[in-house]
Image (tube, rainbow, N blue to C red):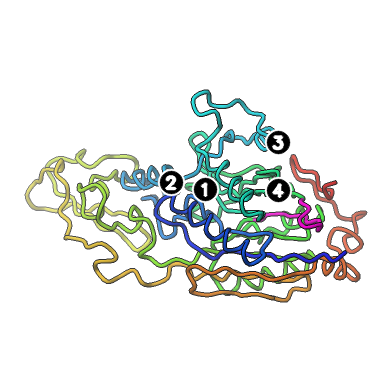
Amino acid sequence: MPQRLTIGLSQAHTLPSLNLTLSALRETTKEAAQKGISILLFPEAYLGGYPRTCSFGAAVGSRTDTGRDQFLEYTKSAVDLGDTPNGAGDAWTEKKLPLNKETGRRGDGTREFLEEVARETGVFIITGVVEKAGGSLYCAAVYVDPTRGVIGKRRKVMPTGSERLVWAQGSPSTLKAVTATIKGVRVVMGCVICWENYMPLLRYSIYSQGVNLWLAPTADPRDTWEALMRTIACEGRCFVLSANQCIKKKNLPSWITGATGHDSGSASGVRVHETLANGIPRGSFKGRRMSMTRTEENHEIAWTCDNEAIDESKPLEAPPKQSVESSGEGEEFVSIGGSCIVNPMGKTIAGPVWEQENELLFAEIDFDDCDRGHLDFDASGHYSRPDAFKLTVEGLDLNPPP
């Protein structure tokens, strides 16, 4: 029997609200269904948003009130899937956790919405999500089957750079692959988020589970990313889908750009009264004037001035600031995309797509190509020397799923 399916990805960006982004996801999935796409990947943090360019007011030894306001906005935009902070695993997936007595569900309804879209369209959906659980945020991805609903979710085990300030670390047990039979074709999927793809041992844990479809939602728009995707496809003898957001500065949230329309307490839309290094609030210094300088690295330096005392309880004056759009700025891209599809021999068969804000990329593939590639290479089998090299992952079975 032919092992052919059409798989695709959406290069799109998060919209100003969760409801708008979910509506866009629904419309994109409907379009994908019309084109015969059976499996559709959305980018990292598509639901909830990737806070590109935002420092959250943090430097070593210092956090600002402005940054805390930004984190509050980000938390409000995140998705509540009804899971526990530690991750309940199969109990969450199989809906065995206690329900909220008022709503009759767990979470904010996003899970149920995604299940409805998959069921209506017949498309298997994988989407990046910024998930809130307890007081923490997680970069996550969910697998949504058209008939079974959500069959898995994983949380990024290693956020990159400044992401670690706002995203907690997920459990390695969530690296578990999922299986689905779609139009008679058995697909074993593993999802590896952004720079997790650079972790050799993590990659091997996915190869060991026998995946034939590697999902790589990302936020990396550099031209070096495609080379990594080609390496993984060739190394794992699997197809690779990698989806990134493509977004201009003007489409970032106003709480990041400082566009007008927020709290009028400052020209940037956030509070002017900030906290200095070591948690000392402005106003604690009496009698001498403080001149504030912010470096390119976003460090704040306080200089004492030998002139008259000022009232530190009053906000510092700031020049009028226009919104990003009204000033004519914001047309530059802060992420140019780079989404692509790669075959098991490491050849890019669709993309990469650059500077296209709303692109649906797809290809018809033959999953038999994965086994054809195993003739001369199997990273976790005949080319692995398991007698000499061994890997264990806490809470994860490295054998292929039944």
Does 84 lie within the magenta span? no
Task: Judge depth for marks 4 and 3 and give the one in front.
Answer: 3
Q: Earlier in the sequence, mark 4 or mark 2?
A: 2
Q: Tag 2: residue type?
A: Ser
Q: Earlier in the sequence, mark 4 or mark 3?
A: 3
Q: Position of residue 214 (x, y in %)?
A: 71, 60
Helix, strand or loop at label 1? It is: strand
Q: Earlier in the sequence, mark 1 or mark 2?
A: 2
Query: Is mark 1 in CB contact (under 8 Å) with mark 2?
Result: yes
Q: CA distance from mark 4 to mark 3?
A: 13 Å
Residue 267 left/right relative to 66 = left
Q: Tag 1: residue type?
A: Val
Q: Earlier in the sequence, mark 3 or mark 1?
A: 3
Say which quarter of the image contains residue 259. bottom left
Q: Tag 4: residue type?
A: Leu
Helix, strand or loop at label 4? It is: helix
Q: Earlier in the sequence, mark 4 or mark 1?
A: 1
Q: Quadrant of the N terminus?
A: bottom right
Residue with the mark numbered 3 = 90
Q: Earlier in the sequence, mark 2 or mark 3?
A: 2
Residue with the mark numbered 1 = 130
Residue with the mark numbered 2 = 77
Residue with the mark numbered 4 = 175
Q: CA distance from mark 4 to mark 1?
A: 17 Å
Where are the magenta residues, as a range? Answer: 180-192
Q: From the viewer's side, name the closer residue of 401 and 316.
A: 401
Q: Position of residue 115 (x, y in %)?
A: 61, 45
